Amino acid sequence: MTLKVFPTGHHLNYKPHRLEKDQGTTITTIGTNNTTSLACCNGRLRYDTLRSCPGRRGAGRGNNRLGEILRLGSWNIGSLTGRVLELVDTLRRRKFKVACLQETRWKGTKGAEYNGYKLWHLGSNGVKNGVGFLVRKELQDQVVEVRRYNDRIMMLRMVIGEEAIAVVSAYAPHVGLRETERREFWECMDEAVRNIPRDEKVCIGGDFNGHIGKEEDGFPMTHGGFDFGSRNESGVTLLEFAVAHDLCIINSFFKKRDSHLITFSSGGRDTQIDYLMMRRSDRGRWWDCKVFPGETVVSQHKLLAMEIFMRKRLVDKKKKKPQIKWGALKGEKIMLFSKKVLEGRHTSIYEDANRLWDEMAEKVTRAAKETLGMTTESFYMTMSCDPGHVTPTWTDATSGNLGV
């Protein structure tokens, strides 16, 4: 028997599997506050069977009644000075909801809005380093915490639909810096990830100044086998960090052409040093990951993007009350309705106005019910990713059409 394994989100008839409801998530302001398993039974894939390929363009993409696709990115921008508006325009055109920024080179902490995006950032002296986030306007109210560790690490925590997600923006020291500085960075990263509860989603985007190589040698559950270049010492450190926290480097799980893998180009040399990571237990949520090579806001670093599936919030079943079929008021029913309203006693102009209004309203309602009829009582479920947004998804009519 031949078993064909289709990567998540690429098979023509792919539909997300039924998602079990998570336990409630509590978000804390400053926290001080394992096992994951992937089986090949019941339609689920083991880690060693999943390999991704470009597949059919657009297959399985878009929003559905279970959730929506969140496009999240990472970009080393060199400096925010003189680039903010152009950067925001690029993210809007590419439909990014959240972007992790590195090497912002702005001093201090700041929160400001730019054309529909909110900027949070952290920098030390304004000369080097600095990290931040740009978040689309509709998600700003879902941000519950912004945690600034130092000018290389920053965390943003959000509640989207019924799920909590912690997004980390990181900028690792390059090879030429002192060993103590590199060790301090990874110790801080370890602390940041360990403090994220296991029931929260985790997404880490950053410039890690390391090469993990195109082969998965020694890291089969962390490295997907599709990457660019040769592995170096900094890449090994990144892979070991990912293994320690049960993370997968998502870039390596999608087979792409080189131009969609290369994240840094300078002096005729092309490398891949920017990566996106999520927990291995959430691998069914990854829909795509690639580089947008044509953006010119930054000359050397490329915009890295991924798409993840976020579940919508379920709202309680609601009861839909019977209503008058006003749409049936046409043709002969207009004359019949008018006759029923006008028949009966004639009122005097000297009677109380409030009582006359109540009597007329009751007469019109009674005539409409008798002439036009009423809808039947029904129940429907509502789902939403945004507070206050209600979308009917199930009624008696739909159940009848489906033969349920």
Image (cartoon, rainbow, N blue to C red):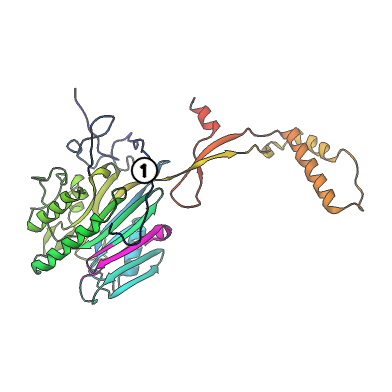
**As drawn, is 75 to the left or to the right of 373?**
left
The residue stretch that appears in magenta:
129-154
What residue is shown at x 43% (from left), y 49% (from top)?
385
At numbered mark 1, what does the secondary structure look like: helix, strand or loop?
loop
What residue is shown at x 35% (from left), y 68% (from top)?
85
Label 1 neighbour load within 10 Å: few <14, some 14-19, many 20+: few
- Check the image and name the residue furthest to the top: 1
Give the camera-side residue of 329 and 395. Answer: 395
Q: Position of residue 329 (x, y in %)?
A: 72, 38
**Would residue 23 be visible to someone looking at this image?**
yes
Indicate yes or no whether the magenta region holds residue 137: yes
What residue is shown at x 17% (from left), y 55% (from top)?
262
What residue is shown at x 28% (from left), y 66% (from top)?
148
Q: Position of residue 131 (x, y in %)?
A: 26, 66
Tell me the quarter of the image containing the N terminus: top left
**Would residue 334 be visible to someone looking at this image?**
no
The answer to which quarter of the image holds residue 270 is bottom left
Amino acid on which the number 1 mark rests in the picture: Asp
**As drawn, is 304 to the left or to the right of 332?**
left
Indicate yes or no whether the magenta region holds residue 200: no
Residue wearing tag 1:
22
Number of residue marks: 1
In this picture, is 81 found above or below 183?
A: below
Give the camera-side residue of 305 and 197. Answer: 197
Q: Position of residue 99 (x, y in %)?
A: 30, 59
In this picture, is 385 found above or below 77?
A: above
Main secondary structure type of the part rendered in magenta: strand
Q: Position of residue 58 (x, y in %)?
A: 32, 43
